[in-house]
Image: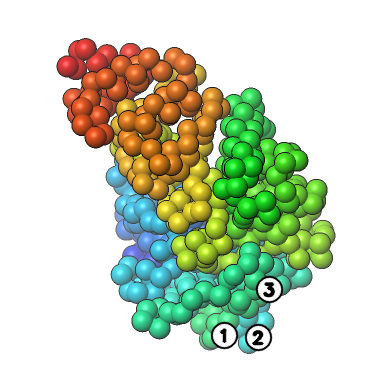
Amino acid sequence: MSPEEAASFIKDGDNIGFSGFTAAGCPKAVPVAIAKQAEEKHAEGKPFKIGMYTGASTGDSIDGYLARANAIKFRTPYQSSKDLRQAMNEGTTDYFDMHLSHLAQTLRYGFLEKINYAIIEAADITDSGEIVLTCGVGIAPTICEYADKIIIELNSRHPKEIRGIHDIYVPLDPPLRREIPVYHVNDRIGTPYIKVDPSKILCVVNTNLENEGGAFTPVDETTARIGDNVADFLVREMHLGHIPKSFLPIQSGVGNIANAVLGSMGNNSAIPEFNVYTEVIQDAVIDLMKKDRVKFASGCSLTVSNPAISEIYSDLEFFRNKILLRPQELSNNPEVIRRLGLITINTALEADIFGNINSTHVVGTKMMNGIGGSGDFTRNAYLSIFTTPSVAKGTKISAIVPMVSHLDHTEHSVSVLITEHGVADLRGKSPKQRAHVIIENCVHPEYKQLLWDYLKLGKGHTPHNLKACFAFHNAFNETGDMHKADFSKIL
């Protein structure tokens, strides 16, 4: 069928599950056709909105087009679209944030609204119902199982020979669940395809569309320093015997800082060749594989630039033995994370002086992207690290504040905080001790005295002052500059 013919099956109020994770592996033609159908219905004065389940963020063809068409009734679990973010923060689209490892099983448990259609990007399908995915998995196995019907986008931009790079495994649900038998990063425990009843496949839409992932911003002085601080810290931990000399698998979040951290680790000769067990496999991982610095990478998606995906596809024999793509309830599974002993490195939007982390909300109220998998990894890590530039908008925003304006990761889960200025090792420290090491090592010089002043205002085990704890945020809301926080006026 054409994308328009396939989209015509979708009705107002239907709930759709989309394949992919980030822009990798996401369908592109049918969602655009659904958005156009919504615009036509709205022009006729008729309602048209759909519920949306995805692996994580998507490309513009899903979140962007559908948000601009005002066609989304609810969305979960993670997004990074400017247009969708605006709709969520204006209240025209309902959004509920979830840990990524929870979504597939939550759908299977029946806690969320039923899925009517799954729309899946595939590199190949067989008459017997074997679906070979492209470069992202997400929640595709579960939505294929629980949707009434499946629409396939067969994208010839992805070679059929990609078969074998996926490891599709869905755990049994309680009370029948057993251990997930991943004991090494490169263990294969499932099948290279999703198996469905062929009668569930409603139609096939042929496409030839490249991924919508953009290139990463080049490493700058700040991200390079953060990366070097992470690498140097891990080397010290090895020398202290806290990390085995053979090293441990790395999880790194998505984005420019994560790419810079992996690059610094790869360039540090004191760090041995290592494995990656993560959600998103980024450009830096592919570069390190070619340099024999990364031995193997298990993830949920190839979240790489288009030149990088072309390079992978042109040398599949090399990369097939170095990459596995799994469903996100495996890539982010707490049992496996704790068993493998992951060193986890994620990015904070904001941290406070006691080690609490805000990953999601700007000034406490405006959703940025979502918690993603950071909670899955942080809470179960061998060693959990958060990174952030110390300031933003020039220096008008301090990423380290008296109290986070929204709490995603408590002090109990955060081992280490790293900025371009240094490292705060929070393990085994009381709240006051954490505050001292964070202010001394991680805070931008322009904000140090303000935070020392705040620390003097509080009493008790965690010395907050509830009248003054949001002075930084109030100053920014009122003046656009956190420097103008004035505790004396509040007190």
Q: Residues within 10 Å of mark 2 (few under 14, many from 20)?
A: few
Q: Judging from the image, what secondary structure is the residue with disc 1 in?
A: helix
Q: Which mark is residue 198?
A: 1
Please determine whether, in this image, residue 436 is positioned above or below residue 146: above
Q: Is residue 28 visible?
A: no
**Residue at x 77% of width, y 61% of height:** 319
Please name the residue shown 63% across and 67% down the image: 184
Mark 3 lies on a secondary structure that is: strand
Q: Which residue is mark 3?
A: 124
Identify which amino acid the numbered label 2 is placed on: Asp
Measured as percent of width and height from the top left, residue 460 is found at 21, 31
Q: Position of residue 370 (x, y in %)?
A: 41, 47
Residue 407 image point, x, y percent: 32, 42
Q: Are marks 1 and 2 in contact (CB under 8 Å)?
A: yes
Query: Rounded to the nearest whole Å, what is the CA distance between mark 1 and mark 2?
Result: 7 Å
Q: Say whether residue 92 is left or right of residue 200.
A: left
Of labels 1 and 3, earlier in sequence is 3
Which residue is more in the foreground, 316 or 129? 316
In three-dimensional space, the C-alpha distance between marks 1 and 3, rounded to whole angstroms, equals 14 Å
Answer above or below: position of 238 versus 447: below
Image colouring: rainbow
- Callout 1 amino acid: Pro
Viewer-proximal residue among 354 and 425 = 425
N-term mark: 1 or 2: 2
x then y, percent, for residue 454: 29, 20
